[in-house]
Image (spheres, rainbow, N blue to C red):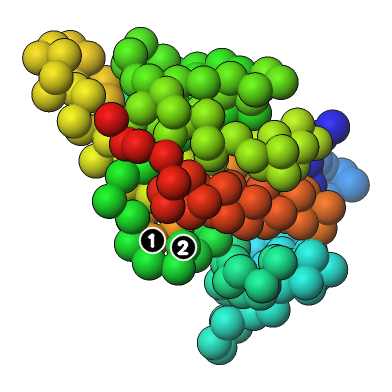
Amino acid sequence: MVRKHTYYRAVSVLWFFGSMVGFIAVGLGMLEPTVPASLVPSRAVAFGGGVGVGLAGLAVIQLFQARAWVRAGRRADLSPQGLALPLRTPDMVGEVDGRPVRAFTVSRSTGGGESSGKSMFTRIEADLDEPAGTGCLLYPHGDASAGDEALRDLQLPSATVDGVLAMGPSEEFARAVLTPTVVDTLEEADSVDAVYVGDAGGLVAEMVSANDSSFLGGLAKRAMKSLPGGESSAGIETKGAVLEADMLAEQTRAVAAVAEGFEQADSTAPTA
């Protein structure tokens, strides 16, 4: 399935460069006699006009994307939080099974070196009742690399139930998180690669220290910087703005279910 975010991104690129090429072509007289070059006084004006029209078009496209984000959120039973600026994607909040959830977008650096850049990500989080002293990482497709390849080689204690993988402070804890509701919800969540709950970053840091590997530690530290959620929540991160209501709803159900399963495990299962 091609996501709506991909369409908006493609239209933005085509519009901007199309505007640039069009104005420059007119300025160079390449569209004579259909479009006379006299419409553009100079090449500098042609270049400036192309940039201006391109940026104006990008603003309009961003406006439509922001509106699509709000519409999708409302259809997923989420509401904008605070003042919604025209060109921004506002935080969306709501409740799933009585648990507060929120959806918001973040922009962060990706890649490295000459290939580095900034990308938009959607984060979905569900609150825990109180900050957790440990954490857990869940992978619906049974492969840690599907969620974050940098964490794949960490030998965290793990358990798998019906193809859903959980990694935690102990095998018993990881298995306890995988309640029937968690497993069923994640099995149905095609748009979810990984869910991080509680102090997942701290759990990874402890394992890196135990392994005493500088190479593994470098990979894990980079991965930890991008982990959604935190000590007080369960979180999912998806590249791009999630503009599909069914996808937002699927992800809010997933984080709410994982938060519930984690709290049950935290109250009963040993951590080590």
Inspect this view and state whether residue 92 appears.
no
Residue 118: give x, y in percent of width and height.
41, 43
Residue 165 location, quadrant: top right
**Residue found 16% across the figure and 14% down from its top:** 211
Q: Is 144 or 175 nearer to us in this picture?
A: 175
Does 6 appear above or below 220? below
Image quadrant where one finds the N terminus? top right
Disc on the earlier residue, 2 or 1 = 2
Image quadrant where one finds the C terminus? top left
Q: Which residue carries the number 1 mark?
A: 232
Q: Which residue is the extreme one toward the right? A: 34
**Residue found 76% across the figure and 37% down from its top:** 184
Residue 162 location, quadrant: top right
Mark 2 lies on a secondary structure that is loop
Label disc, if present, on residue 244 of the rendered structure: none
Residue 234: give x, y in percent of width and height.
49, 52
Q: Which residue carries the number 2 mark?
A: 128
Residue 191: give x, y in percent of width and height.
72, 37
Q: Is 58 or 202 nearer to us in this picture?
A: 202
Residue 179 location, quadrant: top right
265 with respect to 26 (left or right) = left
